[in-house]
Amino acid sequence: MSSATQSNSVPKRSGTVALIGRPNVGKSTLVNNLIGQKVAITSPKPQTTRFPIEGLYQDERGQIIFIDTPGIFLKAKDPVSKRVNEKALEPFNKDVDLALYLIDHTRKRDFEEAKVVGITRKLNIPKVLVINKIDVTEPTYRAQYRFLEEECDAVVEISALNRTHLKTLLETIFTMLPERDQPIVDANLYPYPAINLDSRTFIAEIIREKVFLRTRKEVPYTTTAVVDNVIERDANTTYIQARVLTTDDTYKKMLIGAGGRRIKEIGTMARKELETATNRKIYLDLTVETDRHWPETLG
């Protein structure tokens, strides 16, 4: 039974599972592929995820609310990075039943990883060490992470990208969650499967993902996306008015590109994905504005 299937039976085991790890270890990819649908945006760049994303998985065994968290930076100097680091830890101050500590064995253990280890050690909940990217054999620094296997309650090796051993990971998670008489979430009340995102936020995230994919260096980190209007024009067509905000006119020029080429590419990529996700014709009116104060609005 797939994650999208609503079971008629009372879930036997259910709970909230939060992911933790440094940037670019594959947390968002893992959550998307566990759930079977895209709930979190992804890119090769750090800080793609800026706030916790909650996604619901359910089958005949029960329900799991997965919380994808931002990667934890060693040093966060700018306002956005500082707020992102704070956001990464917010779920662990709430009722979380299990933590998935994700590591990338192809990267050396450094001071950033040491910071995550310190945070994870303080969590008074069961922990699963998830070793990602087993599809890559070289380089490997597995020996540097071996001590963590003794500190966690279970160890599962996976490839989030290739979906390798994700069934094993789900089985492990379910065995470690508490038994409950009732579902913890009524999926009919939420925009399943991303249960904490409204439609405008989801659209804005898709746009921001394309900015991360189509721009370089510091440009993506100066940007956010805002959706101003979503209008259902008819049974099959949606009009979306949105803006990409950046902190400097120089970055605005880079985002627009020569002859408006780059922002058009970003808009086209976002539009195509939204059409696939909604099965509707999308008209995306996307502009770029300079707003030096937008980082202050990062909630």
Image (cartoon, rainbow, N blue to C red):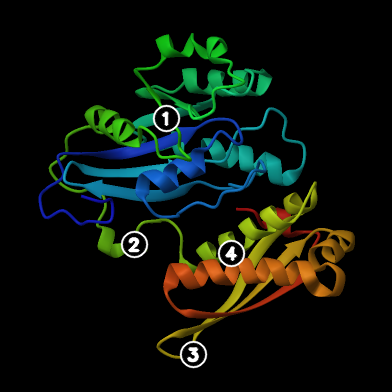
Frontmost of labels 2 and 4 is 4
Q: Residue at x 56, y 42 (%)?
A: 87
Closest to the camera, between mark 1 and mark 2, is 1
Q: Alpha carbon of mark 1 to alpha carbon of mark 2: how far?
A: 29 Å
The kind of residue tagged 3 is: Arg
- Give the residue type that dot 1 points to: Ile
> Does label 1 or label 4 sit earlier along the sequence?
1
Could you say which quadrant of the image residue 293 lies in? Answer: bottom right
For this orientation, the residue located farthest to the bottom is: 234
Q: Is residue 102 left or right of residue 243?
A: left
The residue shown at (83%, 67%) is 257
Marked residue nearer the N-terminal end (1 or 2): 1
Secondary structure at numbered mark 1: loop
Dot 4 alpha-carbon crowd within 10 angstroms: few under 14, some 14 to 19, many 20 or more: some
Residue 4 in the figure: left or right of residue 12: right
- Residue drawn at the location 34% of the way across and 45% of the way down: 65
* Label of residue 204 in the image: 4
Q: Confirm whether residue 39 shows in the render.
A: yes
Percent position (x, y) of residue 298? 64, 53
Q: Amino acid at mark 4?
A: Ala
> Residue beneath label 3, please?
233
Q: Find disc 2 in the rendering and name its residue.
A: 190
Residue at mark 1: 158
Can you give x and y, in whole percent of width and height, for residue 134 in the image?
Answer: 48, 27
